[in-house]
Amino acid sequence: MNIEIELIIIPKLIVAFVLGLFIGLDRERQGKDAGIRTYAAVCLGATLFTTIAEHIGDDVTSVSRIVANIVTGIGFLGAGIIYRNSDSKSSQGLTTAATVWCTAAVGVAIGLDMFFIAITASLMIYFLLSLERRKWYMQWKNKIKNTDNNNDKSD
């Protein structure tokens, strides 16, 4: 790999870093365990692996294998994030695991030069993460829960 190719990769890494920071910012503000550092590292790592695979050769199957392994690896990371609370009979970490997985996809998109897709996906992920602080969303969510609870009681 020559220096010109490396100079092409550096801006991709910067974009991945910034988008990962952006996505992780909401989680950091909410005091979640996975925050800016986690999301930026996932996005950066996925971009780096994808970009390097893309520049190793013209073999499309090599790139697809790397992307598949990123998806699998992040899946294992996500599985470690999710846990079941037997006392409250609820699961914790589902949103974090899902958004870490999506952030890896953002990194892959950057690595494959799909910058508009990566930016759009980042904005969408951030919006999803911010929903729990939106009054209209919480009202809608509570309305659905109340409707479901009423239906359960009438059965």
Image (cartoon, helix red, strand yellow):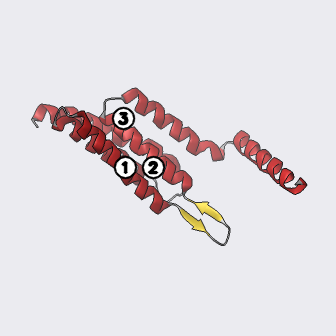
Return the x and y of residue 95 as percentages of the image width and height: 55, 51
Q: Which of these two is toward me, 10 or 63? A: 63
Extreme residue in the top direction? 116
Residue type marked 2: Val
Q: Which residue is rendered at x = 66% and y = 72% of the image?
A: 87
Crowdedness near tag 1: few (<14), some (14–19) or many (≥20) residues, C-alpha within 10 Å: many
Q: Quadrant of residue 135?
A: top right
Position of 136 with respect to 86 (left or right) is: right
Crowdedness near tag 2: few (<14), some (14–19) or many (≥20) residues, C-alpha within 10 Å: many
Return the x and y of residue 52 as percentages of the image width and height: 21, 41
Q: Secondary structure at mark 3?
A: helix
Residue type marked 3: Ala
Q: Which of these two is toward me, 42 or 64? A: 64
Q: Secondary structure at mark 1?
A: helix
Position of 50 with respect to 117 (left or right) is: left
Q: How many marks?
A: 3
Determine if residue 51 is in view. Answer: no
How much space separates mark 2 and mark 3, taking CA atoms? 14 Å
Q: Quadrant of residue 57?
A: top left
Per the rendering, the mark at residue 3 is none
Which residue is disc 3 drawn over?
109
Q: Secondary structure at mark 2?
A: helix
Determine if residue 78 is in view. Answer: yes
Which residue is disc 2 drawn over?
100
Single out the mark in the foreground, 3 or 1: 3
Q: Earlier in the sequence, mark 2 or mark 1?
A: 1
- Circles 2 and 1, Cβ within 8 Å, touching? The answer is yes
Residue type marked 1: Val
Which residue is disc 1 drawn over?
42
Q: With respect to residue 15, does 96 lie above or below?
A: below
Extreme residue in the bottom direction? 87
Quadrant in the picture for the N terminus: top left
